[in-house]
Image (cartoon, rainbow, N blue to C red):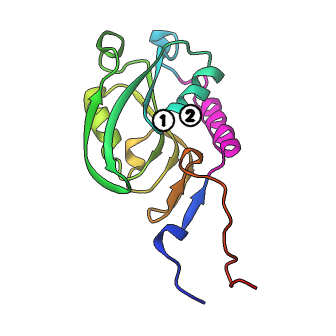
Amino acid sequence: MTDRLPHEKGFHVSWDQLHRDARALAWRLDGHGPKETGGWKAVVAITRGGMAPAMIVARELDIRTVDTISVKSYDHQSQAQAHVLKAPDAEMMGDGTGILVIDDLVDTGKTLELVRSLYPKAHFATVYAKPSGRPQVETFITEVSQDTWIFFPWDMALQYVEPYRGKD
């Protein structure tokens, strides 16, 4: 038996699975918006990974105001210093009260830490969470180990994979 390469400890997410998990996230968030604002005012997706789950959550919870915050924290598969490329509407955001911030994954937590510093009263939710980043998120669906690489459907294409034990 050969040692596995780091990318082989992967968690592969199909479009169907992502849709089910994002709907489960919406169900978990339903009715938990702040009462003083009448529930969630808006959904803010962290681009790019948070856009698909945010769209599904917004649909499920009938939230019509959707915006994005663009944060760059990866250079291909290497994590770098997070910085904001595009911020959501400042008047809508305020301190984050009543805002639901959605991302696909919290990994080390650096991205959410940056966004939380800008909108400290927002509610942060992700579909998937790793242990190092978990303290940065209030709501998530599935936790995976820190050394697991999540393969999202927008990053993959169908192709032949050699059997684990060889070619025969």
| Location of residue 131 with respect to 65 vertically, above or below | below
Residue at x-position 69% and y-position 84%: 165
| Location of residue 114 with respect to 1 vertically, above or below | above
Q: Quadrant of the C terminus?
A: bottom right
Residue 145 is situated, as x and y percent measured from the top left of the image, at 49, 62
Distance from Cα at disc 1 to Cα at disc 2 = 6 Å
Residue beneath disc 2: 53
Viewer-proximal residue, 98 or 63? Answer: 63
Viewer-proximal residue, 35 or 92? Answer: 92
Residue at x-position 49% and y-position 75%: 5
Mark 2 neighbour density, 10 Å: few (under 14) some (14–19) many (20 or more):
many
| Location of residue 31 with respect to 48 vertically, above or below | above
Residue beneath disc 1: 50
Viewer-proximal residue, 72 or 58? Answer: 72
* Amino acid type assigned to the residue bearing label 2 in the image: Pro
Residue 116 is situated, as x and y percent measured from the top left of the image, at 31, 33
Dot 2 lies on which element? helix
Give the dominant element type of the magenta stretch: helix, strand or loop.
Answer: helix
Image quadrant where residue 22 sits: top right
| Location of residue 36 with respect to 30 vertically, above or below | above
Residue at x-position 61% and y-position 30%: 26
Residue 56 is situated, as x and y percent measured from the top left of the image, at 61, 28
* Amino acid type assigned to the residue bearing label 1 in the image: Gly
Image quadrant where residue 131 sits: bottom left
Question: Is 149 positioned to the left or the right of 24 in the image?
Answer: left
Residues marked 1 and 2 touching at CB (< 8 Å): yes
Question: Magenta segment range?
Answer: 13-32
Residue at x-position 61% and y-position 25%: 30
